[in-house]
Amino acid sequence: MGFKTDIEIAQETVMEPITAIAEKAGIDDKYLEQYGKYKAKIDYNLLKETNAEDGKLILVTAINPTPAGEGKTTTTVGLADGMQKLGKKVMVALREPSLGPVFGVKGGAAGGGYAQVVPMEDINLHFTGDFHAIGAANNLLAAMIDNHIFQGNALNIDPRKITWRRCVDMNDRQLRNVVDGLGGKTNGMPREDGYDITVASEIMAVLCLANDITDLKERLARIIIGYTYGKASEQKPVTAGDLNAQGAMAALLKDALKPNLVQTLEHVPAIVHGGPFANIAHGCNSVTATKMAMKLADYTITEAGFGADLGAEKFLDIKCRMAGLKPNAVVIVATVRALKYNGGVPKADLNNENLEALEKGLPNLLKHVSNIKDVYKLPCVVAINAFPTDTKAELDLVESKCKELGVNVALSEVWAKGGEGGVKLAEEVIRLVEEPNSFTFSYELEGTSIEDKLNAIVQKIYGGSRAVLTANAQKQAKELEALGFGSCPICVAKTQYSLTDDQTKLGAPKDFEVTVRNLKISAGAGFIVALTGEIMTMPGLPKVPAAERIDVDETGKISGLF
C-alpha cells in the first residue's frame, strides 16, 4: 500500500485565507501584516496592548532521536488539531526550519502526514525572510569589525582574538575555516575566519529571547565580538555596542522580530517563528511567539528540539527562566521503533516485533520521564507515535513500564489520521494541565560556579557522574567568571543521539563523564555555550543531499520536499 508524500498531502489541502485564520485567533486587523494570501506577520505591539489572560502552555519533547525518526513536530501539530476537535481554543507555536538541513538531511521540517503546518513549501524555504535578515545583521557586524581594524583600529581589537564569525543558511563544510583579507593592503587585514550556519548565530538567540525592539537593541549592543591586544590579564572584551553597530542591526531585524502566522492542515492558527538558538540542536521558537500564542489561545502547544536532555532542558532552564514562563504539562514523544533502536536493533530490522530489545531501549524513555517529573516537577504524558508495524504486545509493554512511574501513555495516530488520531492524547493533556505543578529548574544561577551548573546538568539530566573541563575550558571558565558572567545559564551543545557526549552510547548509560572542551559567552543572548564532543556550528551535506530530489515545474509547483 502506497502512502502519499507530505508535500502531496499539503498541496491537496484547501487553505483558508490568512485573514480568516487571524480572525479565528482573535487578532485585530491592525496587527496583521499580510505576506500573500496564506502568510502574515503579527505586529509585536499586540503583546503590549492586550489585556488577555495567559492560556495554558504545553511543551512537546521526545526521547533521544534516532535515524528512525520520532515525529515530534507531527505530534505537536496533531495534538493541536485534536484539541480543536474537542472544541478548545488552541494555537501551535513552532520554530522555523533552516535551509541547510532542508536541502541536506531533512527535506523539510513542517510536520508530516496529516499533521502539518502549511504552506509547507514556503515554511521550508525562504518563508518571510527572517533567516535572511538574521544572516544580514550577523554579516553586517562582521563587516564592521574588519572595517574598524582596517580604518586604524581605535578599539585596539586583536585580530587573533575575534570570536565573531560570518554565517550563511546552508550546510557548507567548506566554509568552517577560511582565511580572508588576502590580496594586499587595500583588501583588509589577513586573518583566520570561519562561517557558522545562520541558525547557530548568536543573533538567532538574541531574536528568540528579545521581548521588544528596545530589548533587542540592548542585547545586540552586549554581543562580545572579540578581545583587545595585551597580556591575558589586560585583554578586554569588545562589544557590538563599542562599534555602534546595534542600531543598524536592529533596523535589519525589525520585521524579523514579528512572529509569523500560518495554519495547520485542519486550520488551527499556528505561529512559526525563530529557530534553533545558540547552536544547531535545540529548536525552540521565540519568546514573543510563545507569549503571543498564550494571549490568543486557551491552550498553546509548543516544542523544543531533539530529546528532552537537549531541547526541553534549554526550554525549561533558559527560555522559561528568562521569559518568566511556567509550562502546565509536558508531552514526551516516543516510537516503538526508536525504543527498539535504543535497545540495539539495526535500522533495517525495526519492523519486526522484538520485546527483548524494546525492554533494553525503554530506560531511555523512562529517564526522560523521570527528569520531567522528578527534576522539573511537571506533569507529563508519553505519546507513542504509532507505526503500522507496532504490535499490541510492544505497545502494552511501553504502557506498563510508564505506569510504574505514574505516567499515562496515549497512542498518537496523527500522521495517518490528523486531528482525529490526536483526540486521545488531547484528552489526557487537557486533564494534565489542571494538575498542580511546582515547576523548578535543574540548577540555580546564583551562588554556583560554571562547573557546578555543568555538573548539575550532567548528573541530574543526563544521568552521568560529572562534567570534565579540559584545561582550555577551565581557563575559559575562570575568565568568564572574572568578567562577571558566572551567574549566566548554560547552553550545552551535545550530540542529540545519546544522553552522553558519545553518540554511539544508546539507551540510558550511567556513571559516565561528559567532556567540555570549550566555553563561550553569548553575552547578548545572556548564556554561556558549552561545547562537548564533536558538535559543530556548521554542519555538512550528506552523500546524497535532499537537494538532489527537490525540483519545481513550469507552473511553479515544488516537489521533493518530504
Image (cartoon, helix red, strand yellow):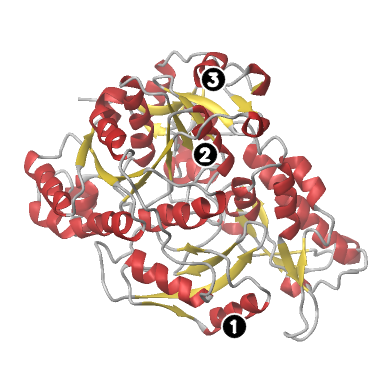
Which label is found at residue 366? none
Which label is found at residue 290? 2
Q: Relative to residue 107, is residue 41 drawn left or right?
A: right
How many residues crowd around disc 2 within 10 Å: few (fewer than 14), some, or many (20 or more)? Answer: many
Q: Residue furthest left?
A: 393
Q: CA distance from mark 3 to mark 2?
A: 16 Å
Q: Are marks 2 and 1 in contact (CB under 8 Å)?
A: no
Q: Nearer the viewer, residue 217 or 47?
A: 47
Coordinates of residue 165 in the picture (x, y in percent): 68, 60
Quadrant in which the N terminus is drawn: top left
Q: Earlier in the sequence, mark 3 or mark 1?
A: 3
- The residue indicated by pointer 3 is 26
Q: Nearer the viewer, mark 2 or mark 1?
A: 2
Q: CA distance from mark 3 to mark 1?
A: 52 Å
Indicate whether 509 appears above or below 340.
Answer: below
Q: Are marks 3 and 2 in contact (CB under 8 Å)?
A: no
- The residue indicated by pointer 1 is 475
Q: Residue furthest right?
A: 152
Q: Relative to residue 513, is residue 148 drawn left or right?
A: right
